[in-house]
């Protein structure tokens, strides 16, 4: 086994190579790997955040949907109640109107009847007066006429 | 003149490094001036200051490939949201593997050097070990022919392609593995002193296991333990890869130097061993990395004396 200065030369060469690797090669490789690891880690975190956001959005959506459904049900219930109320009011109003119309109609009928009766009485009175005048051959004054009518009304 | 190809020369050729070094003046040996050479016959005269040029070449080349691939692999799709694939995927797998190991062995202690060190050690050793799977003759023979064609006329010791040695697996050279272990050892001492403090570091080497009354004995025992760590770290890697390479060479010998049936058997064995060796290649790279992290973690541990 021939040991010579190659041993020292190799030791020096090794120290030089280690120094080059330590200074210029290893840190760059490690930095590249760590940078990519960081990017992957950031990506995963972002994906997780997006997942969480999606979950939150889903929950919010479901909550909103549920609230909307409740509100819709309430609105529907109110609308139904209101509709019933409107129908009831309309019915009441229609009944009242009908009653009013009926009352008015009855009043009109009564008025017409009274008017017809009055006309009839007037006509009868005139006929009676004419007839009486023709029979008596005398004119009946207004005062007499009134007195006769009054008497006839009382008798009637 | 070309050396005759024998079993011994074949093995010798594959296990010999291209060594360059300085040969000093030695009148007794007939050397009258000092000079630099890569002549394999002058290796024993070079002394300590010789360099295994082939091992260092492959080591630096593969280290450069490691840095280039990892730098390019990540810069291509930087800042992109596209899922990583191909080279980037491989780079990220390696980084995650290393980070997991550093986390499990090093715990919560913050030291930005440990992970890059572990990554460099793991991928670099893996690439160096993988050179063992290149067919044993391919690159040495190619390098021999190129060297002979380029410098055969001008360089006296290149007498033929086989005279040019070119070992391609750096981790089968103990200088390479021990060199890396030595660098880890230096870092261990540095962190032991800076994290624990010089006093605690010396106390750790002198007050265990028998307390303050047997400091010399403690020191000897602890030093053996302390020095054994980098040596075992380097020799473990070297031994495993050297043995693997040796088996590849022996199987290759079956292909070229035996009869046809044995050659066919050798081809099958070569495939089986290559498959098994993939496991060893990765395992040894992992063990070196894990022990490096463990030793540095121990250097960061503080305990009361």
Image (tube, coloured by chain):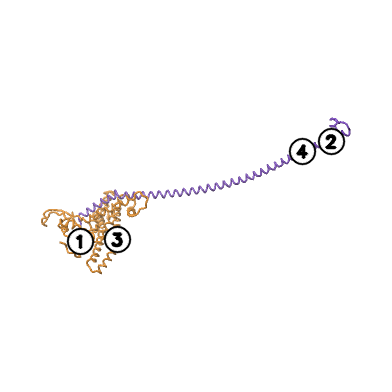
Mark whose residue sits in front, 3 or 4? 4
Mark drawn on residue B278:
3
The verdict on a common chain for dots 3 and 4 is no
Q: Which residue is mark 1?
A: B13
Q: Could you tell me residue A21's position as x and y percent?
A: 29, 50
Of the numbered discs 2 and 4, the one sitting upstream in the chain is 4
Q: Which residue is mark 2?
A: A127
Q: Which residue is mark 4?
A: A112
Q: Could you tell me residue B13's position as x and y percent?
A: 20, 61
Label 3 crowding class (10 Å Cα cut-off): few <14, some 14-19, many 20+? some
Q: Is residue B80 visible?
A: yes
Q: Colour of chain B?
A: orange
Query: How many tags in the picture?
Result: 4
Query: Marks 1 and 3: CB-CB under 8 Å?
Result: no
Q: Colour of chain A?
A: purple
The verdict on a common chain for dots 2 and 4 is yes
Residue B241 picture quarter: bottom left
| B206 or B277, nearer to the observer | B277
Q: Secondary structure at mark 3?
A: helix
Q: Quadrant of the N terminus of chain B?
A: bottom left
The chain that hosts pointer 3 is B
Label 1 crowding class (10 Å Cα cut-off): few <14, some 14-19, many 20+? some
How far is mark 1 from mark 2, CA to CA? Answer: 176 Å
Residue beneath the point at 37% across and 51% down:
B82
Query: Marks 2 and 4: CB-CB under 8 Å?
Result: no
Residue beneath the point at 38% across and 49% down:
A39
């Amino acid at each position: 086994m021939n040991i010579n200065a190659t041993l020292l030369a190799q030791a020096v060469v090794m120290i030089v190579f280690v120094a080059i690797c330590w200074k210029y090669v290893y840190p760059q490789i490690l930095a590249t790997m760590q940078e990519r690891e960081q990017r992957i880690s950031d990506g995963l975190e972002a994906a997780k955040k997006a997942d969480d956001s999606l979950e939150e959005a889903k929950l919010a959506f479901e909550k909103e949907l549920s609230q909307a459904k409740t509100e819709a049900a309430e609105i529907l219930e109110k609308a139904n109640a209101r509709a019933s109320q409107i129908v009831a009011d309309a019915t009441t109003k229609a009944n009242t109107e009908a009653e009013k119309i009926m009352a008015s109609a009855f009043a009109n009928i009564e008025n017409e009847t009274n008017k017809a009766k009055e006309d009839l009485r007037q006509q009868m009175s005139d006929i009676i007066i004419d007839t009486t005048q023709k029979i008596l051959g005398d004119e009946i004054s207004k005062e007499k006429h009134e007195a006769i009518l009054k008497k006839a009304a009382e008798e009637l | 003149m070309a050396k005759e190809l024998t079993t011994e020369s074949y093995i010798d050729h594959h296990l010999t490094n291209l060594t360059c070094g300085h040969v000093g003046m030695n009148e007794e040996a007939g050397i009258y001036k000092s000079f630099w050479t890569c002549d394999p016959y002058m290796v024993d005269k070079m002394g300590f200051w010789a360099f295994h040029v082939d091992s260092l070449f492959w080591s630096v080349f593969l280290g450069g490939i490691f840095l280039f691939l990892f730098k390019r692999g990540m810069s291509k799709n930087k800042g992109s949201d596209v899922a990583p694939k191909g080279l980037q995927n491989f780079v990220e797998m390696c980084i995650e593997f290393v980070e997991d190991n550093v986390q499990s062995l090093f715990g919560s202690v913050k030291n930005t050097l440990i992970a890059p060190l572990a990554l460099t050690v793991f991928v670099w050793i893996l690439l160096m070990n993988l050179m063992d799977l290149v067919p044993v003759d391919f690159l040495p023979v190619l390098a021999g022919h190129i060297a002979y064609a380029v410098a055969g006329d001008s360089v006296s010791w290149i007498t033929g392609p086989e005279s040019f040695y070119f070992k391609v697996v750096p981790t089968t050279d103990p200088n390479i593995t021990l060199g890396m272990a030595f660098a880890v050892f230096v870092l261990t001492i540095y962190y032991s002193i800076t994290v624990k403090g010089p006093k605690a570091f010396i106390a750790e080497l002198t007050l265990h296991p028998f307390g303050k009354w047997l400091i010399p004995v403690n020191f000897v025992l602890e030093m053996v333990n302390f020095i054994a760590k980098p040596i075992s770290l380097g020799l473990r890697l070297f031994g495993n890869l050297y043995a693997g390479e040796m088996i590849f060479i022996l199987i290759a010998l079956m292909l070229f130097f035996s009869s046809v049936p044995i050659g066919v058997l050798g081809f099958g064995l070569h495939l089986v061993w290559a498959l098994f060796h993939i496991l060893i290649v990765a395992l040894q790279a992992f063990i070196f990395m894990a022990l490096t992290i463990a030793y540095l973690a121990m250097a960061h541990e503080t305990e009361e004396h």
